[in-house]
Image (cartoon, rainbow, N blue to C red):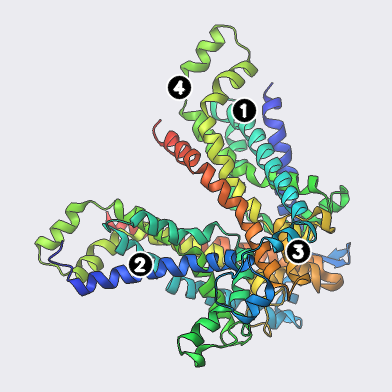
Amino acid sequence: MTARHRAPGRVAVHLLLWGYAVVALLPLVVMVLNSLRPTSEIFTTPLGLPASPTLHSYARVWTEASFSTYLLNSLVVTCGAVLLGTAVSALAAYPLARYDFVGNRVLGAYFLAGLMLPIRLGLVPIFYLMDSMGLIDSLLGLTLLYAASGVPFCMFVLSAFYRSLPGELDEAARLDGAGEFRIFGQIMLPLVRPALASVMLFQFVPLWHEFLYPLVLLRSDEKFTIPRGLSQFFGEYTTDWSALFAGLVLATAPLFVLFVLATKQIIAGLTAGMSK
Amino acid sequence: MLAVFLLPALLLYSVFIVYPLVTALDYSFFEWRGIRQTGFAGLGNYRDLFGVYPYDRQLWRAFGHNALFFAGTMLIQNTVGLLFALLLYRYGRGKRFLQAAFTTPYLVDPLVVGYLWSLLLNPTFGPVNSLLEAAGLDSWALPWLGDTRTALPIVIVVNAWQWVGFPMLLFSAALAGIPAEYHEAARVDGASAWQAFRRVTLPLLTPAIGVVSVLTFIGNFNAFGLVYAMAGSTGSPAGSTDVLGLLFYRVAFVEGGTEAIGRSSALAVLMFVFIFGVSLLASSYFRRRERRLL
């Protein structure tokens, strides 16, 4: 190994990789640092550490620019959608994976087709559908739409998990006289729990970031999710850079926290899926 | 019994996903006045997109920008991602930290990335240009996002900054799957490092290259949030960053006029057919190349 890598080459590799690590992280560090100093300071010294760090901008963005509302809306819509989408899929994937009935395969294909269709293709009809149901500018409408968009992916993953469970499990329970709902709730569901966790996390990120649907479907400030609120906010606070940076940090922080908390769960879920 | 399990998912999915998709196709074949259908249009809406001002010009321009976006991303993001994966393969201490650092930007919302870089690249108060000036590169301190010649390349680079960790991780996983004996054998046969890479490693990476290419293609042709944040809904300056996603949004909800529904639906169908078709063709092409390897 050492014979093939001459010293100058090795140094260049280290420099390149660690140099790029700086390029990858520095913009995010600058984002946080600039949110901690007043706009006048950012304008006079674009490059620099905060002279006296202050959370003043966060306080303003949180209340004045109603980021607290945006965060709450994003949490309600995303969590609601992920729970609903996963719940209905966990129910539906069970008979599809473990029962033989007429139309089983057609139904499976029908759900799977959704994996390949871009839901943005239906944006205009969705707008008029929501309009006809009175769900424009409604968090409920957005939640239902988001939940539905996760169904194909959930069905795909959860069916595979149900199928991997041994058949003797439910047969034994059925012989013991357990009803179908009990078999589902007390035997099947606990066994696919690791899969449920990772399926939920994988739905969470794109929904948390979704921008086009809120842009089209939401109208009033008090209904905005974080991405929609952010685009509004950037139009209104154009010269208040300290607030802009604070807004960007507030929009980014929740997902970082989630990932730090959930990384173990994801890995557990993935490995549980592989070692059947 | 069965219905209790199946119905909720079936209902939710059919109403909010399948019905709108089928309806979009249907909408694209009708004439519209506002929200009223006034008759069957056949392929009229599709013809309008190619023949009626300003769509005839904007459609091809946006398509060209998407194509450049894809080409630039393949060239910059995916090549650099492969390079990082190769350099990190058997890299000692700090490997995990470097991998984590390179993938961090992709946890950030593309919209946030767009807004963040538009601030960083600001010609007057942005730290990027002050950094260039501090390094004595004054002639490089340009209004990056304000110039029609640099705006699109900058969008491509910023997008690459966000996503480079993704090809890196996929290529790393693929490299880890190549048996060590292959490299040993190449070395014993006297192959140089470059020959071993060109003749052994690269062909064995074909499946990973296929996956990365197809996903890059789909992602680039669906681009919206990042470009919206950096260039607004018109792809400023002067439409030099306009892409199909922005054009679709404008036709449907901003400047489509009374015929917005028909034309935007036609555009959505065209985009879908193109993206889906090319992805299918590319996937089968890569699968055939893989089979030739075995």
Mark 1 belongs to chain: A
Q: Please state which amino acid type lies under the numbered disc 4.
A: Pro
CB atoms of marks 1 and 2 within 8 Å: no
What residue is disc 2 on?
A: A17
**How far apart are the two marked residues, 2 and 4, measured between alpha carbons?**
47 Å
Taking depth in this image into account, of A145 and B123 the one nearest to the observer is B123
**How far apart are the two marked residues, 2 and 3, measured between alpha carbons?**
50 Å
What residue is disc 3 on?
A: B28
Q: Please state which amino acid type lies under the numbered disc 2.
A: Leu
Q: What element does badge 1 sit on?
A: loop
Residue count near mark 1 (Cα–Cα under 10 Å), binned few <14, some 14–19, many ≥20? few
- Which label's residue is closer to the chain start, 4 or 1? 1
Taking depth in this image into account, of A33 and A208 the one nearest to the observer is A33
Q: Please state which amino acid type lies under the numbered disc 3.
A: Ser
Vertical relation: B141 (above or below) A251: below
Q: Which corner quadrant holds the N terminus of chain A?
A: bottom left
What residue is disc 1 on?
A: A102
Q: Nearer the viewer, mark 1 or mark 2?
A: 2
Taking depth in this image into account, of A81 and A180 the one nearest to the observer is A81
Q: Which numbered disc covers residue A166? A: 4
